[in-house]
């Protein structure tokens, strides 16, 4: 019940394309859903996050769509650039509004954006 | 300014040795974490400390012992290293004033056990 399932494992798009990465969860106690971006040799960097009381959040070229009833959420990258090539992780956290609570991560998606 | 820092960045050691990884955060956060990323890049939490108190302890072998001397530091000591301990270990912290549950990760420590 703690799992977060992420797909696809890898994704290749052309510059300007809109890659979409999907995640699904089972645990209804999850109340915070961040996406992380990781470049080779670096730590995961927080990209954008959403709470289940909203259906969409946009920050720059990155948009999260959230479907509470389906227990699914997805990341869309508008006008993708070669510099967006990285591994993307979705995650989910339970624990209310406290400052702590373990993140359960998806398996990761390796995104390649060709020039 | 480095927010979450870890030392060393690389650690190569032999089976059976004992090693430590150090983590420091200058974000003023009150919660720190250790995550393990395996060869398939899967990230899994190991431990979490809130105000120096252990609050999350996943099913990790007791050869792994975290220690938090103060809110800004969380170290990880590993005894009797095994080949399967080879991975990248990430420290993270959370508890900022604005969004208390946002977690920020360090650059990682790549541990190789030979």
Image (cartoon, coloured by chain):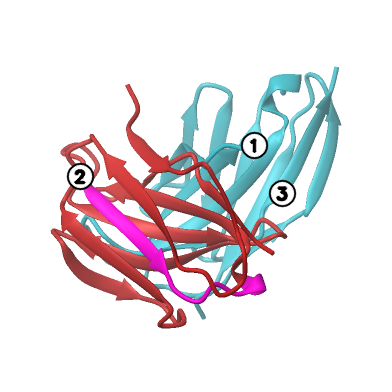
> Looking at the image, is B107 positioned above or below residue A4?
above
* Chain identifier, colour cyan: A
Q: Which mark is residue B29?
A: 2
Question: In 3D space, how far apart are the residues under numbered discs 1 and 3 (Cα atoms)?
Answer: 13 Å
10 Å crowding of disc 2: few (<14), some (14-19), many (20+): many
- At horizontal 24% and vertical 42% (from top left) the residue drawn is B99
Residue that badge 1 annotates: A76
- Chain on which label 3 sits: A
Q: Are marks 1 and 3 in contact (CB under 8 Å)?
A: no
Q: Secondary structure at mark 1?
A: strand
User: Of the residues under marks 1 and 3, which one precedes in the sequence?
Assistant: 1
Could you say which quadrant of the image residue B14 lies in? bottom right
User: Is the same chain shared between marks 1 and 3?
Assistant: yes
- Chain on which label 1 sits: A
State the image coordinates of residue B34 (x, y, percent, origin top left).
40, 59
Q: Nearer the viewer, mark 1 or mark 2?
A: 2
10 Å crowding of disc 1: few (<14), some (14-19), many (20+): some
- Chain B's colour is red
User: Does the rendering let one see residue B24?
Assistant: yes
Residue A36 on the magenta span: no
Magenta span: B73-84
- At horizontal 66% and vertical 60% (from top left) the residue drawn is A107
Q: Secondary structure at mark 2?
A: loop
State the image coordinates of residue A1 (x, y, percent, origin top left).
51, 81
């Amino acid at each position: 019940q703690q799992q977060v399932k992420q797909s696809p494992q890898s994704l290749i798009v052309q510059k300007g394309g809109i890659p979409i990465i999907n995640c699904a969860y089972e645990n209804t106690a999850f109340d915070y859903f961040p996406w992380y971006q990781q470049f080779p040799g670096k730590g995961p960097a927080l990209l954008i996050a959403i709470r289940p009381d909203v259906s969409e959040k946009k920050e720059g070229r990155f948009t999260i769509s959230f479907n509470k009833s389906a227990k699914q959420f997805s990341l869309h990258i508008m006008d993708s650039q070669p510099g967006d090539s990285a591994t993307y992780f979705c995650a989910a956290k339970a624990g209310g509004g406290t400052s702590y609570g373990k993140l359960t991560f998806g398996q990761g998606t390796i995104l390649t954006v060709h020039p | 300014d480095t927010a979450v820092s870890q030392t060393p960045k690389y650690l190569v050691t032999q089976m059976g040795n004992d090693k430590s990884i150090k983590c420091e955060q200058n974000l003023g956060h009150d919660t720190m974490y250790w995550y393990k990323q395996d060869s398939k890049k899967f990230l899994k939490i190991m431990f979490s400390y809130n105000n120096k108190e252990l609050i999350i302890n996943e099913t990790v072998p007791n050869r792994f012992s975290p220690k938090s001397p103060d809110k800004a530091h969380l170290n990880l000591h590993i005894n009797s290293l095994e080949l399967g301990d080879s991975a990248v270990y990430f420290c993270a912290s959370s508890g900022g004033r604005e969004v208390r549950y946002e977690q920020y990760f360090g650059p990682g420590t790549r541990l190789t056990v030979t």
